[in-house]
Amino acid sequence: QVQLVESGGGLVQPGGSLRLSCVASGSIFSIRYMGWYRQAPGKQREWVATITSGDSTNYADSVKGRFTISRDGKNTVYLQMNSLKPEDTAVYYCKTVTISNTYWGQGTQVTVSK
């Protein structure tokens, strides 16, 4: 079992920055990769970024060049979000995939508004 706790969300003006954190606990030795997803009101959850255990990263086109995913050891992943836009407003979820299961955090709200 892996437990995920996200933090760092909040209200920010357009053009501003936020850094989200996700801390994993439990069977972290089995983690293969971690990622961030988001879900805006009335929309389906969408993939944002992924980082593997070998630090390979991938980004959705909508955030490429503005967001950066990084890791600190095996159990913490960050999402640095710069140049935020109103359309980035969503609940952001951390996800991890192990050799046998997929786990999600509870989500953290990001609101981009004047």
Image (cartoon, rainbow, N blue to C red):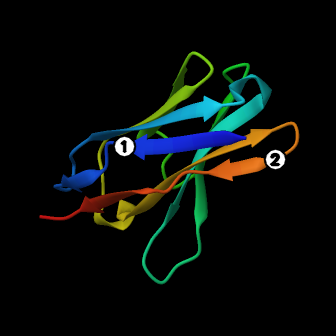
Query: Height in image: 6 above or below 78?
Result: below
Residue type marked 1 = Ser
Residue found 74% across the figure and 31% down from its top: 31
Q: In this view, does 92 lie above or below 67?
A: below
Quarter of the image with the C terminus is: bottom left
For disc 1, the marked residue is 7
Q: Which of 90 and 68 is in front in this view?
A: 90
The quadrant the N terminus occupies is: top right
Name the residue tied to disc 2.
101
Q: Which of 55 and 22 is in front in this view?
A: 22
Give the farthest residue toward the left: 114
Mark 2: few/some/many CA within 10 Å (<14, 14-19, 20+):
few
Q: Quadrant of residue 21?
A: top left
Residue 7 image offset from top left, x and y in percent: 36, 43
Residue 28 x, y percent position in the rendering? 69, 27
Q: Considering only vertical position in the picture, is 41 above or below 12?
A: below
**Element assignment for label 1:** strand
> Which structural element holds mark 2?
loop
Residue 86 screen position, x and y as percent: 29, 65
Relative to 57, is 101 above or below?
Answer: below
